[in-house]
Every structure is written in C-alpha cells, then in structure tokens.
Amino acid sequence: MNVKNYLLYFCCCIMVFSFAAQPGHAQSPGGISTGNTIWIRSDNGITNTSGTVTQWQDNSGATITGPLTVQPIQAGATLQTAPQFIPIGINFNPYVRFNGLDNSLSSTNTFTGTSLVGNSNVSVFQVVNVKGGIVWLKWETDQVGSGARLGFENAGGNIRFDFPKAVPATAGQNVGISNVQNKHSLSTVYADATASVNRLNGADENTLPIPGPGDFGSASDKLVIGNESLLNLPAEVDMAELIIYSNTLPAADINKIESYLAIKYGFTLNQSAPWSNNYTATNGTVIWNNAQNNVYGNDITGIGRNDATALLQKQSLSVNTSAIVTLYNGTYAAGPFPADNQSNSNGFTNDLSWLIMGDNGGTTTLNQCIFNGKGQRMQRVWIVSKTGTVGAVTLSVDQAAVPANTKNILVSANPAFLPGATTMIPLTAANGKLFASVIFNHDEYYSFSSDTLVVNTVITHPLCSNPNSGSVATTVSGGNTPFTYSWNPSGQSTANLQNVAGGNYILT
C-alpha cells in the first residue's frame, strides 16, 4: 500500500473509531463474555489526535481499567508520550504503534490483580508485531515479580509470558519456541493451577509446569502497555487487539476467539495435526472445516459478519508472504479498491455470513493443461467455504505477482476444472491489478488461467476450389505447444498446420 493514500487520516484533529453494535446483540470476543476483563481493539474506542493515540477505551464492559491514557508512570521516570495510530496496519485494520522509547498507555484505574485475573487462572489473546526492546505489557506486585506478575516480554524475538510469578523462572516465565520478531502474530496464552501454555497461530508452542499460585490480591497497580512502570524496559511493538479473561477458557472457546481474530487479521490457524484447527462462529457453526479442506490449508483468509463478536471484515489478504489474492466484498467496475476495511461500504445483508478461502500451496506458474490442452492454468488452486448470505465478491491480484499471460479466473465444483463444468471469467487489468467479480457457491474451486487457444487467419492467396493451390497464414495464441491441428477448408479435404518463422503457422 502507498502510504500517501492514507495521509488524510492524520489531517483530522480528532478521530474516534467505533463499531456500531447491531440491535439486540451483546458483543464479546468470540461471543465469550464470562470472565472477560479487558478487550481493546485498534478499530474501536480510540481517540486519535493528529496521528497519536491519547485514549484507548476498553470494550469488555468490565470497567476495571477505565480508559487507557498517557500518564506519568513514576516520579523521576521518563516522560511518557502517546503511541502512534497506524491506519492500515494488518489486513486493512489499524495498529497502535509503541516506539520502544517513551510511548505508553496506562489504565486510569489502579486495581488489585484479582480484579483482572485469577491467582492461578488467566487467558490472554493478542494480535501484535514485536519489533524490538523488551517489555510491552505489565501488571505486577513488585519489581521482580516475586509475588504476582502478568506480563509479556520480547525474549530474543520470542514471546515470553509471565504468570503467575516471575521469580523463580520456573514459577511462570514461559518462552515460546518461534521467533516472531517483525512478524504479525496471533498470540494466545493461558494458565491453570498446574501449567501455563504459550500458543502461536492456533498451535501450542511451550507448556511450563507452575509450582503454585500467585498472590494477585495482595497489591494494587495500574496496567501499563508500552513503557512499563517499574523497570523502564520498553518494547517497540505494534498492537491491534488485546483480550484478557480472568479464567482458563476451554478449548472450544479458545477456538472461537482465535477464529474471530484470524478472520479479522488474515491469519492462517495451524491446519496440521494435532492442532487441525477449524474456524468456528460464535454460535458453534464450523465455517472452515479442517478435515474437508486440509489440502487447501495455506494462506487462509476471509470476509464476514458475526455481530456477537463485533466482526465486520469486508476485505482481506492473508498475512502470509506467499498469499497473492485479495478478497473484497462487492463488485468494483474499474477500481480503485477501498484503502481499508472501515472505508469499504459493501457490508453484508445478514449476520453469521462468511466467505473463507485457502489454497493448496501450488506454484503460480501456468503449466497445468485445461480443456484438452487448449489452455493452461496455475498449479495453485483455491477452495471457497461459504456460510450464510454472501453475494458477489471481487478477487484481485497484482499483475507483477502472476505470469504475464494470466487472463482469466476458472471457477468449478471440481478441482480438475473439467470442460463443460467450468466457468471462465475474464480478468480486468487496471492500475497494476488484475481483478474480476465472482458469485461463489459453497465448496467451489478457483484458479487462474491463460486464454484458451485462438487461431487468427490472414488470407495470403485467393481461395480456389483446389485446396492445395494456396496458403493461409495464421497466428496461434493460448494453448500448449507443440500445436498439431487439422483444417478442413469447405469440407473438401484435411490440411496440416506447419510451424514457420516468427511464431506463425501455415495451413497447407
């Protein structure tokens, strides 16, 4: 994306982003309200003053923290400043960027830790991009975390989850396995009376036994995001969403919240065994079935509406670097496409509606024969899972990301794209994009293709009754070389197609 297109966001003096709740719907992450103590979202409740975030409102309804604002965090500490608002941070949704120096937001309220978590129980979900530094979130009873600590740190590029204590290390310093530095990450962590679990993109990474509970009721403190209050060890981090529960959620509820975050932010939940994640709606409906779609479990992304979890994602591109297709709700005759999710005016008619797609991981080379050799398609094939009411959508790719002779989208109920059972939709080229509108059925497949074979003829000799008395020059495009075709002029005889210089052919 060209950042110049988004400078208008910073010209406004004050902008407050919000999601209008649908009448009759209480909203909570994944539809799970019990125990939800914090829910902050970069697309809602932010007061953005000249490009900086001066207030971030909690959406949980728990009223524990109050609004998070810029505050002096300790006498003599570094003067704190507001983090930056990034309008297009991840999958067309915003980020709040903490600079790793002096940016922080603190809860208005000071509260005991047991208002936020249990002494042995917690579940936390985050969408973050960790770039450097050390600490980005902290509530603790003392400087070293010997009594109780809920915290997150950058441990050499890996996510460190501290709960219920940080001293000794075996009391709860759980470090993930994967390096996430400078990567969009869907982080889930949870703990119960025996262990803490560090989880990334829907897969458990590290489980740490914990010897006993914390003492979160023994002190009161503020929650700080960014430059934490005691050690002054700030992290440079982009944060899109933070969700905290005071209880340990069951696996089904974790999956609902991870599904919500994955669709909103373009994450592929781990599709490999033993995780084999489905994507699940707030009402329990499976909207992406791992067992059925496992072959197509790459670069999963989607759009949809789920009022109970405040989801209204109208355009999407997987965060994976291998992804090439952007999905937009609605049709676009000639562009331009909406710059971000909020400015897309094409909503969904009904709640509980989704269109989710994933691919088989094939290459983007056009080398697979279609229509008995009359054309070529990509090895990469996508499947579409459709739930509820979704009309026309638009698929878009950068022209530079696909072969130059990419001309069409193929849509079929069969991944072999059989003749007679496949629709070929021409792509429109504009502003460096190739795009087309499609109305999908559930469990349909699509891929990209060249044009099918075209033979253009130019008469170079008058036609005569004797078919061997003249020649016709032709230019052949599409199809699969070498070409072998027959010609029956006027039904009198059969002639051969012979290759001559310049890519032309002579019928004789």
Image (tube, helix red, strand yellow):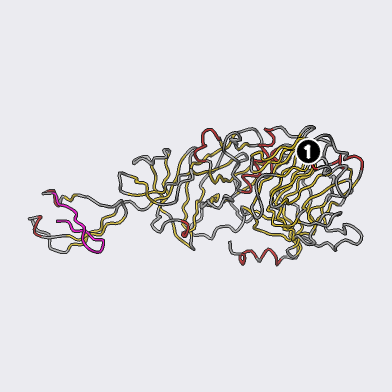
Give residue 307's quadrant in the image: top right
Identify the residue at image location x=46%, y=57%: 434
In magenta stretch: residue 255? no
How busy is the neighbourhood of tag 1: few (under 14 within 10 Å), some, or many (20 plus)? Answer: many
Q: Say which of 480 and 463 sits in front.
A: 480
Q: Which residue is nearer to you in this view: 422 or 224?
A: 224
- Where's residue 259, x and y in %? 64, 40
Q: Nearer the viewer, residue 305 or 227?
A: 227
Q: How many marks?
A: 1
- Kind of residue at badge 1: Val
Q: Residue at x 79, y 47 (%)?
A: 151
Which quadrant of the rendered structure holds the C terminus? bottom left
Q: Quadrant of the N terminus?
A: bottom right
Q: Give the magenta-colored segment's residue range.
A: 494-508
Q: Is residue 39 left or right of 379 when viewed as pictured?
A: right
From the viewer's perspective, tell me whether residue 330 is left or right of residue 112: left
Label 1: state its secondary structure.
Answer: strand
- The image position of residue 299, as x and y in percent, is 54, 46
In percent of width and height, residue 483 lies at 25, 52
Classified by dominant secondary structure, the portion drawn in magenta counts as strand
Coordinates of residue 498 in the picture (x, y in percent)? 19, 56
Toward the viewer: 306 or 163? 163
Left or right of residue 430, residue 82 in this image: right
Return the residue at label 1. Answer: 122
Q: Is residue 486 above or below residue 36?
A: below
